[in-house]
């Protein structure tokens, strides 16, 4: 009797694990796009610190990401049970914030005065404080993208039991965090790997190591520059996409634009239209929020001056 109960228990556990693995696979596919954005954004956020502090900074942000998900997973489960209507408004706020950050970066690029002010503020900080600000910024951005990943996953497993939902969300949270920050750590240390290979080549006379080392040294700054650009673009695409899926009118407009592009430009236009729509909407929304933000800051500064 005891043996039969044990076999039944093992069968139930096996079935549960199989269900979790299947749902996790589906959720991973649906969140893969956000994973790419997460990678670009976080690689961009930790860029700029000294070489010997790159891995500690990545580790600090990774720990913050785990804390984010430790907050978001239970919160998502509670909201899905008690306040399901709150998920969309929270996502919208996160989307607007991403658009705002992207627009701030564009303003810094396009308006030298603003950029110089930012540089002056940075110069007044010591390295420890500068590093703390970088980590805080990266963790804040991670929180928004993690929230989107969790909500997408939650939608994928909406019909499952609460236990299965919790397990799948936990699996996705761990996999995404390890995947993103493992890749970020590898990217920021490319130049160190190149220097190591060059040193080895000088000692051994290995031509292949020399070429590979030079290639990595040449590629590292270009890759970081690309990720900085891709990270800004990702802010607009992800933020705009959140707004589109949260506001029915915008979603219908996007569908109309996509159908128009399909009719006039074919399948290539159909594929590009939603991305362009999301990106342009993200730029517009971010610009509006930046304008409001700077207006409020200016008004507060004038009041303080009086």
Image (cartoon, rainbow, N blue to C red):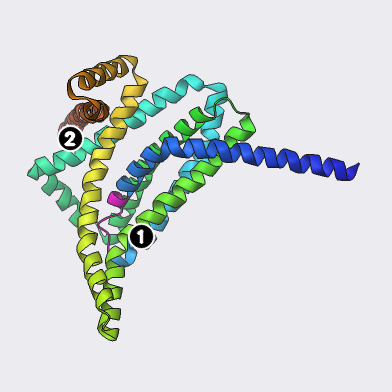
Secondary structure category for the residue under label 2? helix
Q: Quadrant of the N terminus?
A: top right
The magenta segment is 43-50
In the rendered view, would you say 158 is above or below 212? above
In the rendered view, would you say 47 is above or below 261? below
Q: Residue at x 16, y 51 (%)?
A: 119
Number of callouts in the render? 2
Left or right: 224, with 64 as reference point: left
For mark 2, does the 10 Å Cα neighbourhood hold few (<14), some (14 to 19), or many (20 or more) residues? few
Q: In the picture, residue 32 is in which quadrant?
A: top left
Secondary structure category for the residue under label 1? helix
Q: Residue at x 64, y 41 (%)?
A: 17
Q: x, y percentage for residue 39?
A: 34, 47
Q: x, y percentage for residue 130?
A: 28, 55
Q: Residue furthest right?
A: 1
Q: Quadrant of the C terminus?
A: top left
User: Residue 301, labelled with which disc?
Assistant: 2
User: Residue 186, labelled with which disc?
Assistant: 1
Residue 45 sits inside the magenta stretch: yes
* SS majority, magenta: loop
Residue 132 sits inside the magenta stretch: no
Left or right: 271, with 25 as reference point: left
Left or right: 18, with 51 as reference point: right
Q: x, y percentage for residue 10?
A: 75, 43
Q: Tell me if residue 72 can be seen.
A: no
Q: Please report whichever mark, 2 or 1, sits nearer to the chain's N-terminal start.
A: 1
């Amino acid at each position: 009797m005891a043996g039969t109960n044990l076999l039944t228990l093992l069968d139930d556990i096996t079935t549960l694990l199989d269900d979790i693995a299947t749902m996790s696979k589906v959720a991973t596919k649906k969140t893969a796009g956000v994973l790419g954005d997460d990678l670009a954004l976080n690689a961009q956020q930790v860029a700029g610190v000294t070489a010997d502090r790159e891995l500690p900074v990545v580790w600090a942000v990774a720990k913050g990401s785990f804390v984010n998900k430790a907050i978001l997973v239970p919160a998502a489960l509670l909201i899905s049970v008690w306040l399901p209507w709150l998920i969309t408004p929270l996502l919208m706020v996160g989307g607007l914030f991403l658009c705002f950050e992207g627009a701030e970066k564009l303003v810094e690029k396009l308006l030298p005065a603003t950029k110089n002010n930012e540089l002056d503020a940075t110069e007044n900080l010591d390295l420890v404080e500068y590093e703390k600000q970088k980590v805080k910024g990266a963790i804040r951005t991670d929180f928004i993208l993690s929230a989107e990943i969790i909500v997408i996953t939650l939608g994928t497993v909406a019909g499952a039991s609460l236990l299965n939902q919790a397990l799948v969300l936990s699996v996705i949270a761990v996999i995404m965090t390890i995947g993103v920050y493992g890749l970020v750590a590898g990217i920021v240390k490319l130049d160190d790997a190149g220097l190591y290979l060059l040193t080895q080549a000088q000692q051994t006379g290995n031509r292949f190591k020399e070429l590979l080392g030079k290639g990595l040294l040449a590629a590292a700054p270009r890759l970081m520059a690309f990720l900085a650009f891709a990270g800004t673009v990702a802010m607009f695409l992800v933020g705009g996409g959140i707004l589109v899926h949260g506001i029915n009118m915008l979603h219908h407009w996007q569908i109309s634009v996509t159908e128009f592009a399909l009719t006039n430009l074919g399948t290539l236009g159909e594929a590009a239209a939603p991305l362009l729509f999301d990106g342009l909407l993200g730029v517009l929304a971010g610009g509006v929020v930046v304008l409001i933000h700077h207006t409020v800051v200016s008004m507060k500064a004038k009041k303080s001056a009086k």
